[in-house]
Amino acid sequence: MAQSQSNRRVLVLPGDGIGPEIMHEALRVVHFFDRRHIASFDIAEDLVGGAAYDAYGTPLRDATLLKALASDAVLFGSVGGPKWEKLPFELWPERGLLRLRKEMALFANLRPAVVFDALAEASSLKRELVAGLDLVIVRELTGGIYFGEPRGIETLADGSRRGINTEVYDESEIERVVRVACELARKRDGRVCEVDKANVMESGGLWREVAQRVRDTEYPDIELSFMYADNCAMQLVRNPKQFDVIVTGNLFGDILSDCAAMLTGSLGMLPSASLGEADATGRRRALYEPVHGSAPDIAGKNLANPLACILSLAMMLRYSFDMGEEADLVENAVRRTLAAGVRTNDIAGSGMRGVSTREMGDAVLRELEHLV
Ligand code: IPM
Ligand code: MG
């Protein structure tokens, strides 16, 4: 018996480059749940990024933003590409994503880096360094230098130009993201490492102070440590298993999460969840997206790895719809697919030819069929 009208409203924004291809495979998982009467979703789709610019002259229409604000979750593909790099800055595809994050107030970006056993060989690091790795980067997503004022390019008296961006964090912005990290750590190994450049930046010193206060007053059970961002980059490739939860600002989080992604074998494996503050009913605004970008070089070729997008869908089930079992199911299907040796090019060994995007989707669906 099919479930009646779903109250799970999901806005799907495939975006540019490989976005539509990988999203197509993730949506097959959604359709599978529907077909098997496991769960149904109310899916709406819209354009974002360069695709929205081409159709409407803007990377994010107000109407799309309103739909995002009214939905329970947004599933996002990727944006950007050389086609739009000549546009004025405010029309770049990336502005669409940044505006969504800001207007939806998605301040906490969870980027788990988990190494699937079958992929430990695919990492550029030695197997023993990454096998069993399971860390999460909690990246602040609506503040810092990404949004700080003043910003821009100004012309000086002598006619030369100056580029300006500002790193700025209020205590409240630090507090709320540190809380998310501590809550998460409670369900894991209970350890949070706060990462900054307090040796150079005053704002980093404030991060330390606030993180320590939040820990002492609200999370005395959590073990809090501090690390400079440059050292953290090094530690991630030297001994990544020392970390449980890393919490950091927007820019360091951007950089460190790409680094953490490669530990797992490929950028094509890493999902993410961007969450807002919970309201009185416990509902949070949320957007789920793969950490990788739009990969214009392989777009439209049926070569992209859809697993990060499929795993982002699993995060949506877990965090927005409290469907932990179903999320486990999707993650197990991915694990079994990898264990069976199915590889797209990005995770195939050198000299091995990987399967297509579509074939990877087929394989995950087959495993799902086995598991339910
Ligand atoms: C990410 C991306 C984005 C960012 C870009 C596409 C704006 O690199 O989500 O990590 O810098 O936040
Ligand atoms: Mg990035």
Image (cartoon, rainbow, N blue to C red):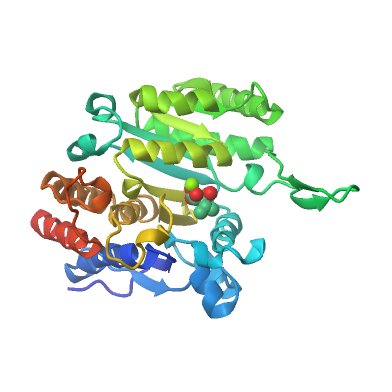
Query: Left or right: where does residue 352 sit relative to residue 7?
Result: left
Q: In the image as oriented, which residue stretches furthest toward the bottom?
A: 55
- Along the line of sight, the residue nearer the viewer: 248 or 164: 164
Q: Residue, x 33% and y 25% (percent of image)?
A: 241
Q: Residue, x 32% and y 44% (percent of image)?
A: 266
The answer to which quarter of the image holds residue 317 is bottom left
Is residue 278 in view?
A: no
Q: Is the residue 18 above or below the residue 144 in the image? A: below
The answer to which quarter of the image holds residue 18 is bottom left
- Along the line of sight, the residue nearer the viewer: 48 or 140: 48
Q: Quadrant of the N terminus?
A: bottom left
Q: Is the residue 154 above or below the residue 201 in the image? A: below
Query: Left or right: where does residue 5 sit relative to residue 212?
Result: left
Q: In the image as oriented, which residue stretches furthest toward the left?
A: 370
Q: Is the residue 135 above or below the residue 323 in the image? A: above
Q: Quadrant of the C terminus?
A: bottom left
Q: How many marks?
A: 0
Is residue 23 in view?
A: yes
Q: Where residue 351 appears, x then y in whole percent?
A: 18, 46
Q: Where residue 274 appears, x then y in whole percent?
A: 47, 50
- Along the line of sight, the residue nearer the viewer: 79 or 192: 79
Q: Where residue 142 appears, x then y in whole percent?
A: 60, 48
Q: In the image as oriented, which residue stretches furthest toward the right?
A: 157
- Along the line of sight, the residue nearer the viewer: 34 or 18: 18
Q: Residue, x 22% and y 65% (percent of image)?
A: 358
Query: Left or right: where does residue 364 sit relative to residue 18?
Result: left
Q: Where residue 296 appears, x then y in whole percent?
A: 41, 61
